[in-house]
Image (cartoon, grey):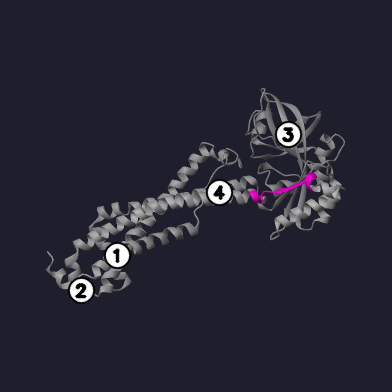
Amino acid sequence: MSARDLIHEALHALEANRGRSLLTILGIVIGIAAVIAMTSLIGGVRNSLVAGLGLNAARAVYISPSYQMTLDDLTDLRRLMPEYEEIVGSAYGYAQTTGADGSVDVGITGAEERFLTLTGAVSLASGRLFTAEDEATAARVMIIDRLGAQALFGSSDANVVGKSVSLGGRDYQIVGIDEGMPQTGGSGSTYITVYMPLSTVLADFGGGYEYLSQVIGFVREGADIDQVMSLTQERVGKLLDIPEDQVEDNVYVYSMKSEIDAMNGFMNAFSLIMGSVAGISLVVGGIGIMNMMLTNVTERIREIGVRRALGATRGDITRQFLMESATLCVTGGIIGTVMGYLVSWGLAIAVSAFGLMGALGGMGGDTAQITPTVSVEAVAIAVGLSIAIGVVFGFYPARRAAKLDPVSCLRHQ
């Protein structure tokens, strides 16, 4: 029999027992749906967490010496460390101002435009980032977030680009709005974060010093991060004239690679656990398939005898029943894949709505949105599992049907 004939016969046989067929594939549907839902949701959570860390988080190396670093030190470090694609610095400041509803505490981060783009610290809703001219002239400009606009001007949707805010007796013009969210402080005040050019913060809030608060290097693609970190610690120690035996205690160098690796390990372990649970459902579904196929063989003994009398070989009978079993499982796999994707979206909406992302480490914030990610590999695995279950659990009934004696089958009533 041709493959087309086998498929036609399989569909006809299953349609004759439509209700029983649907109940039989339920275990397959549940198992495949669980696999797709979990892999999609876990993929979405992983992407959300990585996005919360920043676009280049895996390549970022944070350098925090106990000795103060200046802009000149940063320039020298860039020259000494060609292993980095870019090295950027930032400085912090603090001020208070009066907003729409009272006192507002303002945390100030001084950063170059490269710092904001490389770290993904700012996602502009409107306006612009800082320019080279802003940095060169220490321009009094800043970027605030939407809820910062609400705290300062009474509305998160207000068009505040171009307006000024007084900090420390100086006026700073707003040139951009970030989508980020501030944190609410105590004592009736609101804490917001704003960004200014690095040179501006050093000049206006540095207390007469040009000390950097944070230095981040972005390792070139393909470089060994652990080796670069060790080399960085050594060279920063020499740059800052730290005694060799004190470098390890006074130059702290770390990266997010270990955190990302740990997160991936946790997600993979969780996927394995959930896959095992789904696997149990698939085995149960496979047993149901075998039970139905054995029942079909018993009910169709005379049909088998007629087919053998008309020239069908044992191989034809085997392939016919295997095709019916595989068709059941593939149908269940397709339904399960669609249901799994829909379930993953439902779970993602629930996780985002209840702010459960914060419980996973706070990366991305409680308001982080999860978008389920259905990979081609997951769908391929689902389809492959469906076919494998159909063949494995359908083989015994198929061989049993093929080995029946044709004469006995024809005499069967």
Q: Which residues are magenta?
A: 248-258
The nearer-to-camera label among 1 and 3 is: 1
Query: Along the polypeptide, which appears first: circle 4 or circle 1?
Result: 4
From the viewer's perspective, is 124 left or right of 140? left
| Residue highlighted by disc 2 | 308
Three-letter amino acid code of the residue under disc 3: Gly
Name the residue furthest front: 245
Q: Nearer the viewer, residue 176 or 361?
A: 361
Mark pair 4, 1: CA separation: 39 Å
Is disc 1 placed on a helix, strand or loop? helix
| Residue highlighted by disc 1 | 396
Is disc 2 placed on a helix, strand or loop? helix
Query: Along the polypeptide, which appears first: circle 3 or circle 2?
Result: 3
Measured as percent of width and height from the top left, residue 19 is found at 25, 52
| Residue highlighted by disc 4 | 266
| Residue highlighted by disc 3 | 107
The nearer-to-camera label among 3 and 2 is: 2
Three-letter amino acid code of the residue under disc 4: Phe
Question: Which quadrant of the structure image shows residue 199?
Answer: top right
| Quadrant assignment for the C terminus | bottom left
Mark pair 1, 2: CA separation: 19 Å
Mark pair 1, 3: CA separation: 71 Å
Measured as percent of width and height from the top left, residue 131 is found at 77, 46
Task: Look at 72% across and 29% down and name the residue there.
Answer: 105
- Identify the mark at residue 111; answer none if there is no mark: none
Judge whether 171 appears above or below 72 on screen.
Answer: above
The reply to whether the C-beta atoms of the residues labelled 4 and 1 are less than 8 Å apart is no
Mark pair 4, 2: CA separation: 55 Å
